[in-house]
Amino acid sequence: MARIIALDGAQGEGGGQILRSALSLSMITGQPFEMSGIRAGRAKPGLLRQHLTAVRAATEICGAQVNGDELGSQQLRFTPG
């Protein structure tokens, strides 16, 4: 099993782009990741509906295992299948 990459979702712009990029790269490389602090600096921290849609689409596309895919979650683990 590949080592899980830890990502801080509050770094950089601190929005959903880091999550979308991580999902894409994870599916391409097969590398799992765990993200904490998702949208931590935003007025409404955590996953919003549009982020959940991206996570669930990625999960379906590659048969991933996911933990933390719920509204408001600030932590997510994604292991591509």
Image (cartoon, rainbow, N blue to C red):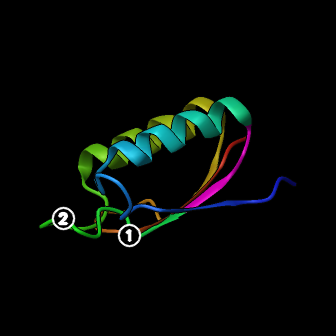
Question: Which residue is label 2 attached to?
Answer: 42
Query: What residue is shown at x 68% (from left), y 43% (from top)?
Result: 80
Q: What element carries label 1?
A: loop
Q: Choose between 81 and 37: the one closer to the eye.
A: 37
Q: Choose between 63 and 46: the one closer to the eye.
A: 46
Residue extent of the magenta highlight: 30-34
Measured as percent of width and height from the top left, residue 26 is found at: 63, 40
Tell me if 16 is positioned left or right of 58 in this view: left
Question: Which residue is label 1 attached to?
Answer: 74
17 to 13, vertically: above or below: above
Give the prevailing secondary structure in the magenta stretch.
loop
Measured as percent of width and height from the top left, residue 43 is found at: 12, 67
Residue 67 seen in this snapshot: no
Tell me if 34 is positioned left or right of 72 in this view: right
Q: Nearer the viewer, mark 2 or mark 1?
A: 2
Identified by mark 1, the residue type is Gln
Tell me if 44 is positioned left or right of 15 in this view: left
Measured as percent of width and height from the top left, residue 32 is found at: 69, 51
Q: Any magenta on residue 31?
A: yes
- The span from disc 2 to disc 1 (Cα, nearest Å) is 11 Å
Identified by mark 2, the residue type is Arg
Query: What residue is shown at x 63% (from left), y 34% (from top)?
Result: 27
Q: Do the residues labelled 2 and 1 touch (CB within 8 Å)?
A: no
The image quarter containing residue 81 is: top right
73 to 32, vertically: above or below: below
Tell me if 78 is positioned left or right of 2 in this view: left
Q: Which mark is residue 2?
A: none
Please identify the residue farthest to the left as the structure is shown: 43
Q: Any magenta on residue 51?
A: no
Q: Is mark 2 on a helix, strand or loop?
A: loop
Query: What residue is shown at x 64% (from left), y 45% (from top)?
Result: 64
